[in-house]
Amino acid sequence: MKELHCIVPGCQWHTRHETEAEIIRRASEHLRETHGETVIRESMLETIKANIQPEKGKAA
């Protein structure tokens, strides 16, 4: 299981899933719905990918 905490400073949102693709989909949806992003730029996707981590307390 992998997890991601929102890339926007101060936001407490997070998600967990088995696949990076689903985490990226959820994070993109969150950025649109919560933070009003209308375009998910390549730099945002790279930041999301770089911040996906193994779930705390568990091995990858």
Image (cartoon, rainbow, N blue to C red):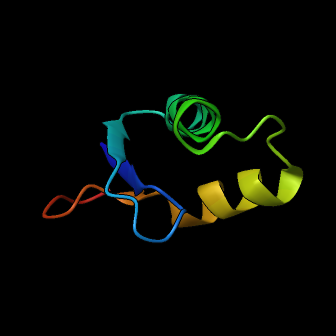
Query: Which residue corresponds to the image point at 34% horizontal and 48% vertical from the top-left?
Result: 14
Q: How many marks?
A: 0
Using the image as rendered, state which of residue 21 and residue 13 is in the foreground.
Answer: 13
* Quarter containing the C terminus: bottom left
Using the image as rendered, state which of residue 12 and residue 47 is in the foreground.
Answer: 12
Query: Which residue corresponds to the image point at 40% horizontal and 59% vertical from the top-left?
Result: 11
Q: Position of residue 46 (x, y in %)?
A: 74, 59
- Name the outermost residue toward the front: 36
Q: Is residue 47 above or below residue 38?
A: below
Q: Is residue 32 above or below residue 52?
A: above
Instruction: Left or right? Give the position of 21 relative to 3.
Output: right
Using the image as rendered, state which of residue 10 and residue 54 is in the foreground.
Answer: 10
* Quarter containing the N terminus: top left
Query: Which residue corresponds to the image point at 63% horizontal and 56% vertical from the top-left?
Result: 49
Instruction: Left or right? Give the position of 46 relative to 18.
Output: right
Instruction: Left or right? Give the position of 48 relative to 16.
Output: right
Q: Position of residue 4 (x, y in %)?
A: 41, 53
Q: Is residue 13 above or below residue 53?
A: above
Q: Position of residue 27 (x, y in %)?
A: 54, 40
Query: Which residue corresponds to the image point at 86% horizontal and 51% vertical from the top-left?
Result: 42
